[in-house]
């Protein structure tokens, strides 16, 4: 993971230290419209494209490269993030597709994180 970046969960909002967190009682959920038209919709599901951006930035990867996914045109806002994940082997896609605008499932989230942490 990129130096200075950490992922913490288990907070209910009133804690002042990491020791006060309770990850069993306070489930952490990543979701939201990240940067879409300047809005933040905290209850919207996170898309696979948004997850690609989060992984690239959190793990200090360089956006860019070439993507071979059929459903990610160069004009898609997340092309460089998806290409970066593909180029380092974090994302393999599904039958030649990345499905950038579909919500990321729990299983896909785990696969992204596993690939980023062990790649």
Image: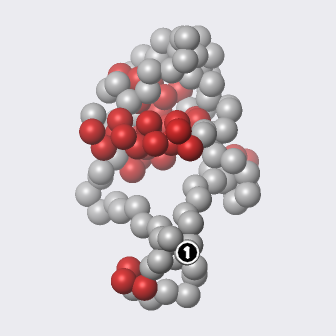
Report the residue at 55% width, 64% height from top: 28
Number of numbered markers: 1
Foreground pick, 23 / 63: 23
Q: Residues within 10 Å of mark 1 (few under 14, many from 20)?
A: few
Residue 37, x across and y down, in percent: 73, 48
Residue 80: in sight, yes or no?
Answer: no
Report the residue at 48% width, 46% height from top: 54
Residue 78, x across and y down, in percent: 56, 32
Q: Is residue 3 above or below residue 17?
A: above
Q: Image quarter for residue 60?
A: top left
Q: Is residue 66 above or below residue 12?
A: above
Residue 88: in sight, yes or no?
Answer: yes
Q: Is residue 107 left or right of residue 37?
A: left
Q: Is residue 46 left or right of residue 14?
A: right
The secondary structure type at the circle numbered 1 is loop
Foreground pick, 82 / 116: 116
Report the residue at 30% width, 51% height from top: 1
Q: What colouring style does the render use?
A: secondary structure
Residue 45, x across and y down, in percent: 69, 47
Residue 116, x across and y down, in percent: 34, 40
Residue annotated with mark 1:
25
Q: Is residue 36 left or right of residue 118?
A: right
Report the residue at 27% width, 39% height from top: 118
- Quadrant into which the C terminus falls: top left
Q: Residue furthest front?
A: 24
Q: Is residue 18 above or below residue 96?
A: below
Q: Is residue 68 left or right of residue 31?
A: left
């Amino acid at each position: 993971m990129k130096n200075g970046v950490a992922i913490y969960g288990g907070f209910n909002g009133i804690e002042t230290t990491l020791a006060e967190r309770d990850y069993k009682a306070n489930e952490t959920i990543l979701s939201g419209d990240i940067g879409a038209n300047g809005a933040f919709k905290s209850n919207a599901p996170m898309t696979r494209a948004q997850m690609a951006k989060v992984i690239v930035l959190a793990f200090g990867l360089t956006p860019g490269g070439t993507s071979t996914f059929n459903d990610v045109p160069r004009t898609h806002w997340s092309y460089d993030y998806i290409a970066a994940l593909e180029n380092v082997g974090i994302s393999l896609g599904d039958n030649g597709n990345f499905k950038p605008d579909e919500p990321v499932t729990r299983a896909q989230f785990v696969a992204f994180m596993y690939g980023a942490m062990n790649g």
